[in-house]
Image (tube, coloured by chain):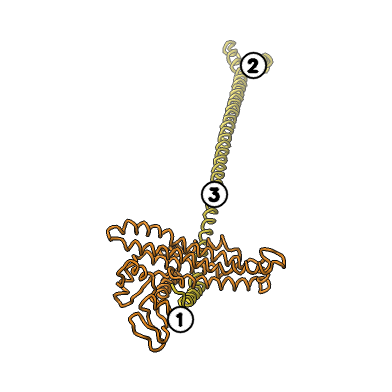
Chain colours: A orange, B yellow
């Protein structure tokens, strides 16, 4: 593995497998110069950064889609053979998840929208599965990927801000959609302009405050999840730098602690999504 | 930690997952759960009803039993009374019959006595005359002494 020093090891583990476009005339890490703009895998972190926006984190996307398919496949499998008699093991698990999510939605969401509960279910289970990937010892899968010739490989999509922002932007679009749909363009604008100070002089101030508050929602959603997962990942990497015989004294407790953190972060993301959407449905 | 196209890819994946969940996962499972809830609720209410029915039936059975017992007691009572009555009546009849028989017997005896006396009386005169004739060695004119003889017979 391309990690001779601890710093390199850490940097290596925090770099995604990036497939992106290198501009014409770019000098690559090995000294060769790109003749014309090409799409390729980044060989160093610097290359990945220089690809700018026109790049894909193949590992993040791959693992998050895999987890999504695992979630939907499993649940669809249960749904296809669901019985209203006595449920078997897997159906019990699925129904427990359903009841948990329904409980959240019932407590928090005070409107009628058939989309909210399945949305919350998708967010909860998907994020939970993505977070759970973190419990796989950090060198296992990157080592396999390395053996297959992939330089960088980061398996936990929620330790990539793209992964968390991707979801929270989806939630943000839903907040905007339902705000406009339920309150109307005028109603929503009025809410932004005349809250919290109901006077026309304060309109610019209100607008600034409310729009900021609105934009903060997806950012805080994404950054909270990303921050927690990323910090946990860094700690796992640091523990992995210790001598082999002492690692277990630290990474076992840390992993046990993450059994708490993983569902908690998924839960917080879900609850806040439902809360924000509930606010979007409230017409004053 | 670069923000790039992954963001959009992730959003698209998210949208597709939500759509799939809304369409193919959520409805069948919630439907089954609701159906089960209804089944359980129905079952519970049926059980409640059944236990109520059982209680009612038991009450009814106890009442019936009580009634039957009372009826039986009344019947026995009645029968006893009737039996006593019958015994009493037959005793009465028997006594009356006995009395009647005794009376009849008495009357017969009386009658026979009267008959015997009459027969005796009728014969007394003849016997007396025969006796007197023997004593007197002559015939006695019955007509001449009939008055005396009648007196004698009347005294018997």
Secondary structure beneath label 2: helix
Give left or right: position of B154 versus B29: right
Nearest the eye: A1 or B118: A1
Q: Which residue is mark 2?
A: B153
Alpha carbons under labels 3 and 1: distance apart = 81 Å
Judge the density around disc 1: few (<14), some (14-19), many (≥20) Cα neighbours within 10 Å: some
Does the residue at mark 2 contact the one at mark 1 (Cβ under 8 Å)?
A: no
Measured from the top left, where is residue A235 in percent x and y? 38, 62
Specify the farthest residue to the left: A245
Measured from the top left, where is residue A173 in percent x and y? 56, 73
Secondary structure beneath label 1: loop
Residue A187 vs B76, above or below: the answer is below
Give left or right: position of A155 versus B8: left
Circle 1 chain = A
Measured from the top left, where is residue A214 in percent x and y? 59, 68
Q: In the rendered image, which quarter contains the C terminus of chain A?
A: bottom right
Q: Which circle marks residue A54 in the picture?
A: 1
Q: Quadrant of residue B153?
A: top right
Question: For the point 30% across and 77% down, which residue is it?
Answer: A148
């Amino acid at each position: 593995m391309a990690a001779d020093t601890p710093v390199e090891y850490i940097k290596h583990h925090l770099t995604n497998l990036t497939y992106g476009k290198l501009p014409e005339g770019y000098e690559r890490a090995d000294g060769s110069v790109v003749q014309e703009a090409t799409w390729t895998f980044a060989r160093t972190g610097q290359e990945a950064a220089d690809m700018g926006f026109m790049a894909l984190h193949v590992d993040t996307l791959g693992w998050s889609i895999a987890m999504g398919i695992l979630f939907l496949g499993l649940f669809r499998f249960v749904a296809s053979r669901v019985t209203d008699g006595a449920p078997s093991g897997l159906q019990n698990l699925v129904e427990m998840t359903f009841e948990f999510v329904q409980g959240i939605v019932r407590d928090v969401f005070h409107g009628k929208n058939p989309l909210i509960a399945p949305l919350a279910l998708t967010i909860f289970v998907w994020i939970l599965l993505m977070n759970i990937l973190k419990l796989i010892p950090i060198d296992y899968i990157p080592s396999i990927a390395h053996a297959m010739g992939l330089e960088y490989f980061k398996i936990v999509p929620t330790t990539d801000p793209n992964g968390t922002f991707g979801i929270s932007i989806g939630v943000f679009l839903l907040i905007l959609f339902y705000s406009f749909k339920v309150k109307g363009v005028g109603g929503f604008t009025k809410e932004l302009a005349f809250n919290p100070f109901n006077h026309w002089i304060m309109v610019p101030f209100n607008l600034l405050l409310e729009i900021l508050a609105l934009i903060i929602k997806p950012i805080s959603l994404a950054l909270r999840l990303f921050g927690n997962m990323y910090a946990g990942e860094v700690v796992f990497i640091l523990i992995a730098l210790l001598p082999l015989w002492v690692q277990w004294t630290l990474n076992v407790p840390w992993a046990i602690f993450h059994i708490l953190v993983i569902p908690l972060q998924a839960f917080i993301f879900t609850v806040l999504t439902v809360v924000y959407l509930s606010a979007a449905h409230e017409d004053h | 930690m670069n923000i790039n196209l992954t963001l959009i890819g992730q959003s698209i994946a998210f949208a597709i997952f939500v759509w799939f969940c809304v369409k193919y996962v959520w409805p069948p499972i919630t439907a089954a759960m609701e159906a089960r809830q209804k089944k359980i609720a129905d079952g519970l209410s049926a059980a409640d009803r059944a236990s109520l029915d059982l209680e009612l039936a038991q009450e009814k059975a106890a009442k019936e039993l009580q009634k039957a017992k009372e009826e039986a007691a009344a019947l026995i009572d009645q029968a006893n009374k009737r039996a006593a009555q019958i015994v009493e009546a037959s005793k009465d009849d028997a006594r009356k019959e006995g009395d009647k028989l005794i009376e009849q017997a008495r009357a017969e005896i009386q009658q026979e006595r009267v008959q015997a006396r009459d027969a005796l009386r009728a014969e007394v005169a003849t016997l007396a005359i025969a006796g007197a004739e023997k004593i007197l060695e002559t015939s006695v004119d019955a007509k001449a002494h009939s008055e005396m003889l009648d007196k004698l017979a009347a005294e018997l």
